[in-house]
Amino acid sequence: MRGESYMKKPIIGILANVLVTEGGLFPGMTRESVSHDYVQAVIMAGGIPVLLPVISGEENIRGQIEKVDGILLSGGYDINPLKYGEEPYQEIDATFPEIDDHHLMSARIAVELGKPMLGICRGLQVINVAFGGTLYQDLSHFSSNCLKHFQKGQRHVPSHTVELMQDTVLARILGEDAVVTNSFHHQSAKDIAPGFRVNAKAKDGIIEGIEKMDKTFILAVQWHPEMMADKSPEMLPIFRELISAAEKASITAFD
Ligand code: MN
């Protein structure tokens, strides 16, 4: 029933990671893992969060994405550089092919099905690589004199400036020329995927946000607004925008 579906809060699928338990009762056991901050941010912004565990097979992944109104690509491990046509350099961290395959395929299927998408940290990198972009495997490859993009201390604390490009979706959402964000990354986007544009940069030139240039809602930021949302409510509109795009997409699907 259309009226009923209109009233329902949109369901946001948060792509999970895999966490290997090191000690405890079941050493070596893997668990599906998503930081509670993502769950909380989706709820605060008016969505219903569900977790999408890492699985394989296009049919299965398509089944996951069909069931949600929008997806949130969370932070996590480095992407295997072979996925964007590079050999691994010294600074690359551990990579997990099954997670990469799930996340990259989810992003492509989401676009195909017209599901809005928000990428955070690794999520930005997944989106860029999924649609043909590349990454700096380490920020030292961009410049030997980068700002500190892996801050020490508490996760919600804003540490560096992010300048927002005029006339972008992100600048409109945040309503500012610049914001101060937290920062927990050692990689960043290098070549931007075709059809996307940069919407945010740190003062050293590191790309801090990208978005799709057509009507599809795909937005991605390199910082962690979900860790800030509780103490810096000005970050919440990023999640609200995903939820409102998901709401619109689910209504259109019923027409
Ligand atoms: Mn940064």
Image (cartoon, grey):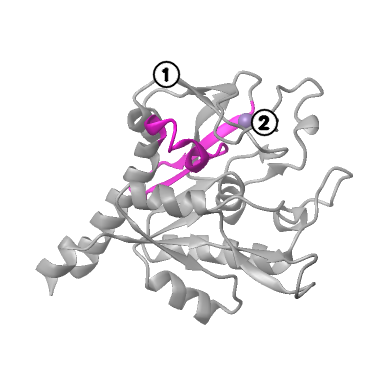
**Neighbours of disc 1 within 10 Å: few (<14), some (14-19), many (20+):** few
Kindly indicate the quadrant of the structure image that contains residue 182.
top right
Q: Is residue 212 above or below residue 35?
A: above
Where residue 177 is drawn, which disc sits there? 1
Residue range of the region highlighted in magenta in the rendering:
206-235
Q: Amino acid at mark 2?
A: Gly
**Neighbours of disc 2 within 10 Å: few (<14), some (14-19), many (20+):** few
Q: Is residue 189 above or below residue 21?
A: above
Name the residue: 27% across, 59% down: 249
Split into quadrants, the picture shows ligand 1 in the one at: top right
Say what secondary structure mark 2 lies in: loop
In percent of width and height, residue 136 lies at 73, 39
In percent of width and height, residue 181 lies at 54, 28
Residue linked to disc 2: 153
Q: Quadrant of the N terminus?
A: bottom left
Numbered disc in front, either 1 or 2: 2
Q: Nearer the viewer, residue 233 or 181?
A: 233
Queried on whether the Cβ of the residue with tag 2 lies below 8 angstroms from ligand 1, the answer reads: no
Name the residue: 86% across, 45% down: 89
Say what secondary structure mark 1 lies in: loop
Question: Residue farthest to the right?
Answer: 90
Q: Disc 1 to disc 2, how far (Cα)?
A: 26 Å
In percent of width and height, residue 14 lies at 48, 60
